[in-house]
Image: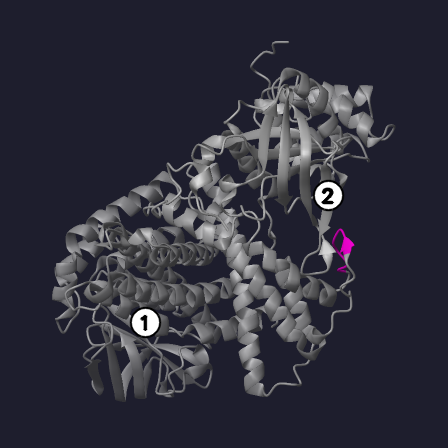
Amino acid sequence: MAIDFFSFTDEHDELRATIRQFVADKSSEQAVREQMATETGWDRAVWAQMAEEMGLAGLIIPEEFGGAGVGYVELLVVMEEMGRALLCSPFLGTAVLATNAVLGCATEAAQKDLLVDIAAGRTIATLAHVEAGGRWDVGGIQMRATGQGADWQLDGSKRCVIDGHTADVILVAARTDAGVELFRVEADAAGLERTSIPTLDLTRKLATLEFTQTPAVKISDGDQSDSLEIALARTVAALAAEQVGGAQKCLDMSVEYAKSRLQFGRPIGSFQAIKHKCADMLVEVEFAKSAAYQACFEIADGTADIRPSCAIAKSYCSETYFHVAAENIQIHGGMGFTWEHPAHLYFKRAKASELLFGDPVCHREALAGHIGA
Amino acid sequence: MSETPQIGEDEIRQRTRKLLEEVHPEKVDSITFRRAQYEHGLALVHFPVGYGGLGVSPKFNQVVADEIAKNSKVTYPDPPISVIGIGMGAPTLVTYGSEELKKELLPRVFSGEDIWCQMFSEPGAGSDVAGLSTTAVRDGDEWVVNGQKVWTTLAHVSKWGMLVARTNPDVPKHDGLSYFLLDMETPGVEVRPLYQITGEAEFNEVFFNDVRIPHDRMFGEEGQGWRVAITTLMNERVAIGGGGSTRKGGGPIQTLLKLWQDRAQDQRSAAGEAIARDRVVQRYIETELLRVTAIRARAAMKSGNPGPEGSVAKLAGAEIYKRLWETCIDVLGNDGLSFEAGYTLRQGFGGTDTPEALAKYQFLRSRANSIEGGTSEIMRNILGERVLGLPGEPRVDKNVPWKDVPRS
């Protein structure tokens, strides 16, 4: 059944209100700053509540695996609200990235095994696929896995692994004779060294993982290059929705400030220099919504090749979020440059999420292939 | 004359079939058919009964059009040359015109017998159109008009012109305006083509030299001209609005992609080609998001929660299309140096049979996108003030008699 593009139901509106209230309670600026300063980077009690009481950990996990089994429209609503509040949480790594990778690439038995625990909030998972070359696409995966049957070993290193130092299970993409396959590595596996890296964006932690004859279980059956590409496209669509939420928040902050900040005897928002900046930010944010919504509704709809729309979403929403976050600092003037003002938190999240999963140029290069340019 | 208030889709279809039984487009000319369509209240169904309508929702206009198309190989849709008359003139006339004018002119504008034009803008009143200087001075039962209008589409073929003139210079600008319907054949009206960047004249300048208008051709009361003009302008957005392709990859972006695919970029290094390709892809993304934003606007309208998507589209579209056509010329490389259509000064516009010719023409024509129908700067003010709620600029012309406001 074809879905009604861009129409949000009352249930969607209720979900949005619920999440907005939740993040208002649990992800105040104060709470974000507290989590930023921790090694873990997120609050276990908050995550437990998200997983157990709200069913968010298993939002897109099918009901047969203990999830809520809802679609990508719900996910987009949730991501927007989380992005708005800079929620520090393993949601992106576990409930989006790892979940999409498992749903797309793992055997049914392995899916059940892992997704039940993810949905219940018992397991934090992530995907490790970026290597020293820095590429975020499947073509960048060089690591060789050795072994046979279920028993394999991994050697080499993976970079920029989201929540890599806190995840209970690491899904590793590595090459076998069959192609790119997916492996499951436990956090306490022998020969796994996890190093948290000091991140630009303190609200989302990354780690470098070193594998030395690390035991791994192969959970896929045959080459997963295409399905991993789709899983990554689905992930960037969700991330684009998060970027839209953050960008909208930056615009709201700017407009609010432009109305209340008086200079030369009048609100700075009455000056066209500021007003036109805000109008341009509004146009960009509305276009970013179009981009993220198109991608997420296409995924929910399930009939189109989602890759072009996902590439558009990641490219456009990344640039919009960063530009709007940068203008937000400019509009706030000196205050916007201080540590105590939240503008820099959004600015850093914006740039980091622009680089995660490939920068806009990478996605436009991929899009060029899809549209014959 | 009174109608039952419950006219629904079926009733409209029935009435349309009845019209077709009496007068069939396959057997008569456009004027005859459209006059009959008017008499049946099926011209503009949202107009009142007796004035070409049935007093029902405008959405039923499509039902009439569909029913005609279903039953006739020949259809007579609104003639493009009548877009101003039907889209903007008729709604203003039906709201503010005298009974006699409505009865006489509404059928003629709908049938296409009379062409209308709109005379608001002046050399000294562009974005600030309420600051206009053309004067109308009362002389008995007539008004005597002097001044100049500009950007007047179709003035050279029009029978009627919607004219806003200043009737009182001693009050603030909005309060001293009156709205007239001018017979363009009146002595003292001079229409000159205004040649534009392409060499063509889509527009005219109109000069008024002691032009006399009977008082009963005034719409609304003396001094109410701005209010009447707003009615015309609101309908302008509806009449002109829309635009853009509804198909993924359709419309102007198709031209750019075709030019790009058809040309080996031999003049560039591999790196240069990659840079150029990125610009092409950025244009693709922008036009695709313009398309999706328009769909979102329609979805929001349907759910009764119109958001900012519509106002956003005017500003974004203007800038996006300018960039798109610029990129086309860059892709053409040295072929972009020639302009085969030439700059022969002439009236009308067009001459775009190949993608190359279209790109070269639109590269020039699209500069107007961000000027006409509200400049991009004015659109940013509108978005800033009406959508985001930012405070307005302090107005130096507010509460000041128009004659005391500085002007260039």
Whether residue B93 appears in magenta in the rendering, the answer is: no
Contact, mark 2 vs mark 1 (Cβ under 8 Å): no
Percent of width and height locating residue B187: 75, 33
Tag 1: residue type? Lys
Work out whether residue A40 or residue B226 is closer to the camera in this orientation and state it: B226
Instruction: Say which chain tag 1 marks.
Output: A
Q: Residue furthest top?
A: B1
Quadrant for residue B8, please give it.
Answer: top right
Quadrant for residue A123, please give it.
Answer: bottom left
Q: Residue at x 68, y 37 (%)?
A: B209
Res B266 label: none
SS at mark 2 in the image: strand
Q: Which residue is drawn at 26% across and 55% down?
A: A253
> Where is mark 1, residue-wise?
A351
Label 2 crowd bin: few (<14), some (14–19), many (20+), radius 10 Å: many
> Where is mark 2, residue-wise?
B191
Q: Residue at x 73, y 60 (%)?
A: B199
